[in-house]
Image (cartoon, rainbow, N blue to C red):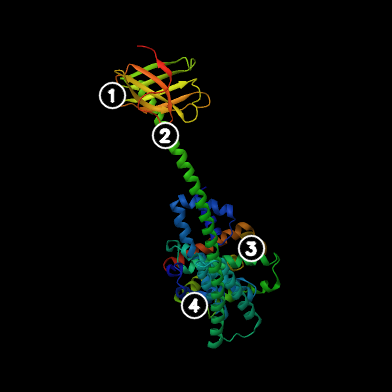
Amino acid sequence: MAHEDYIERIILDLLGELDPAERGELETHLASCAACSREAKAWRNPVHALAYTVAPIAPPAEVRAQLLKRVAVLKAESSTTSSAKQANEISVDQEKSHQEKSNVVVLTPRSAKDEAVRFGRSSFFSAAIAAALVIAALIISLIYLWSRNQALQTELAQTYGRLSQVQGELEQARDEKIILTAAESRIRVLEGTKVAPRANAVLSYDRQTGRTLFYASNLPQAPAGKAYQLWFIADSKPISAGVFSVDDAGRATLRSQVPSSGLNASLFAVTLEPAAGVSSPTGDKYLLSSAS
Amino acid sequence: MRAVARGDEQAFADLYDRYSSILFGLLLRILNGRAEAEDVLQEVFIQVWQKAGDFNEDRGRAFTWLVTLARSRAIDRLRATESRDRTAVRAARETIEGEINADEEAIRSEEGAFVRSALAEIPAEQKRTLVLAYFEGLTQSEIASRLNEPLGTVKTRTRAGLTKLRELLRSRF
């Protein structure tokens, strides 16, 4: 469209005759056309110059009074709660309808003060209600948060428990790996004796650190008050590597530490001893390493 | 205006005191009754209070902004409440020339006087279309049917009248 056509639209727009679609189209054009934009500015004053031809007529005083009151309410609205706002609007509307009914409005200082006091009192009352509601809401939130906190604490404790359990399992797994892969580790097989012919076991130990890993299966349940004990026999001297018991399936796992005196053992055995263990084997042998 | 945008109630009251009479006069000229004019005057100033932040000096003078708001609301109210067939009351208002020229109480400011004298220099037909458009809120087509003139003629006269006014006012504004 040529700019000439836009001038007509600009004038119609200033007269308020464009519909929203036409208006939008014009504004889009003005945004990108400096010449037409200048034109639009230049036509503003001539169009509204007509407003200068009317006689100024003073509006009634109560219009000013009502207006200023409404503005004060609008201003207060932006910083109070909705219940206070409703109370104010009601009181302003009441005053407005009261004034509309009377023919002559006489604003003496005393009645203005009364209105101000009524206004002030009702706004104080509603502000108090608003404050009470806010406090009640806060208390309810507080109670809810406290009980939620309790629940979370319990959950947390459970989680810690599980966490340390898992950490324990992880450490064991690490140990096992270390023991089995360490350069100085040894693996021995133990076989069941006459009293437990089907029993067997695998022993792995680290000759550097003494860390010991022992798995046994098919061992009979130990009688009450008794437990199995693992021995490292070095230079014909038995050194204890720990006490263990078997589960319902006859399996046992022992992770322990053997003293350095047992590290160059060539013979390994498992005997049945009193539950607390002994310093020297006394009971029957259940597992024995094959001669190396 | 910036003070009003900031929420300065006193500045707002000052604005009202300065412009309310002009705007009320305009509203009375456009609308049918006093009660309506009072309502719209309040609405306009409430809108001023709420939208003072939108006013940009770049876009024109405060007076023009206020007048635009007032006229716009008045015309909207007019279109909403009046029937399309204008009543005899409005027809009686059409002693347009007489109103403009004989009005001794028109804005006594220098600007007001200047505008009135400028308008006096515009041919009567052009002035008539402008007044009908501005104060009656008639669209160009409505003016055409009211005056029983072709639409093209109305458009030409509107444009010519405003162009003349623009030239005359150029030195002033």
Number of the front mark, 1 or 3: 1
Q: Which image quadrant: the C terminus of chain A?
A: top left
Chain of the residue under label 1? A
Q: Which mark is residue A168?
A: 2
- Check the image and report above or below for A211 versus A80: above
Check the image and report above or below for A236 versus B172: above
- Numbered disc 2: secondary structure: helix
**Image location (x, y in percent) of residue A183:** 31, 19
Query: From mark 2 to mark 1, how far is it between C-alphas?
Result: 28 Å
Q: Chain of mark 4?
A: B
Q: Picture coordinates of residue A241 (x, y %)? A: 36, 26
Question: Dot 2: few (<14), some (14–19), or many (≥20) neighbours within 10 Å?
Answer: few
Q: Please identify the residue farthest to the top as the structure is shown.
A: A292
- Label 4: element kind: helix
Residue extending furthest toward the front: A282
Q: Secondary structure at mark 1?
A: helix
Looking at the rendered structure, whether the residues under marks 4 and 3 are on a common chain is answered as yes
Q: Amino acid at mark 4?
A: Asp
Residue under label 1? A261
Eyeballing the image, is B122 above or below A144? below
Q: Which residue is mark 3?
A: B143
Q: Examine the image and state in which quarter residue A66 appears.
A: bottom right
| Residue under pointer 4 | B17
- Name the kind of residue labelled 1 in the image: Ser
Report the Cα–Cα distance between label 4 and label 2: 84 Å
Camera-side mark, 2 or 1: 1
Tell if the residue under mark 4 belongs to the same chain as the one under mark 2: no
The residue depicted at 56 percent of the width and 86 percent of the height is A111
Three-letter amino acid code of the residue under disc 3:
Ile
Q: Residue A223: x and y, percent?
A: 50, 27
